[in-house]
Image (cartoon, rainbow, N blue to C red):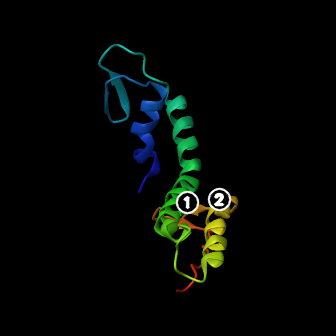
Amino acid sequence: MNLNDYFFPEAIGILRPNTQWYSIKSKVTFLDGTIAPTEAEIQAKIEELTAAEPLRLLREQRNHLLQQSDWRMVSDYPGANQTEWQTYRQSLRDITTQSPSLDSNGNLTGITWPTPPTD
């Protein structure tokens, strides 16, 4: 996946919000006469979005794992290992202190995920 192509529409949307536009071979034309951002502005925004993508994906996966274990935090959870689940969930919250990156396929690397307790 080419992240430049992936983030191009988002970059334009951020640089010129609430406008309608089209692109042919990376030349942007706005339907309402809005002045298109420069190629340098677009590239800078794409680089910013690309740099933020690993942490965004990390948070997305972390939030999913937290959501899956939410039910274990209710006061009437029947398990004897609620303290272990609390520790696991705190480890998930702290995972954003790690430095994730993306491999050539766009998958997260450089993350050590905590292991959930066994029931």
- Answer left or right for 71 relative to 48: left
User: Where residue 70 appears, x then y in whole percent?
Assistant: 51, 65
Location of residue 82 with respect to 31 vertically, above or below? below
User: Where residue 44 appears, x then y in whole percent?
Assistant: 57, 36
Find residue 79 and name its label: none
Q: Residue visible at 44% across and 43% down?
A: 7
Find residue 96 and name its label: 2
User: Where residue 4 appears, x then y in whole percent?
Assistant: 46, 45
Foreground residue, 18 or 1? 18
Amino acid carrying label 2: it is Thr
Q: Is residue 88 visible?
A: yes
Q: Residue at the top extreme?
A: 33
Q: Residue visible at 54% across and 30% down?
A: 40
Foreground residue, 95 or 7? 95
Amino acid carrying label 1: it is Leu
Foreground residue, 57 or 78? 78
User: Where residue 92 appears, x then y in whole percent?
Assistant: 61, 66
Identify the residue position indicated by label 1 in the image. 58
Q: Is residue 99 visible?
A: no
Q: Residue at the right extreme?
A: 97
Q: Earlier in the sequence, mark 1 or mark 2?
A: 1
Foreground residue, 65 or 105? 65
Classify mark 1: helix, strand or loop.
helix
Q: Residue 111's image quarter?
A: bottom right
Residue contact between numbered discs 1 and 2, judged by CB atoms under 8 Å: yes
Q: Residue 35's image quarter?
A: top left
- Answer left or right for 78 relative to 2: right
Location of residue 19 with respect to 96 vertically, above or below? above
Q: Residue visible at 49% across and 64% down?
A: 104
- Answer left or right for 37 relative to 94: left
Q: Residue 88's image quarter?
A: bottom right
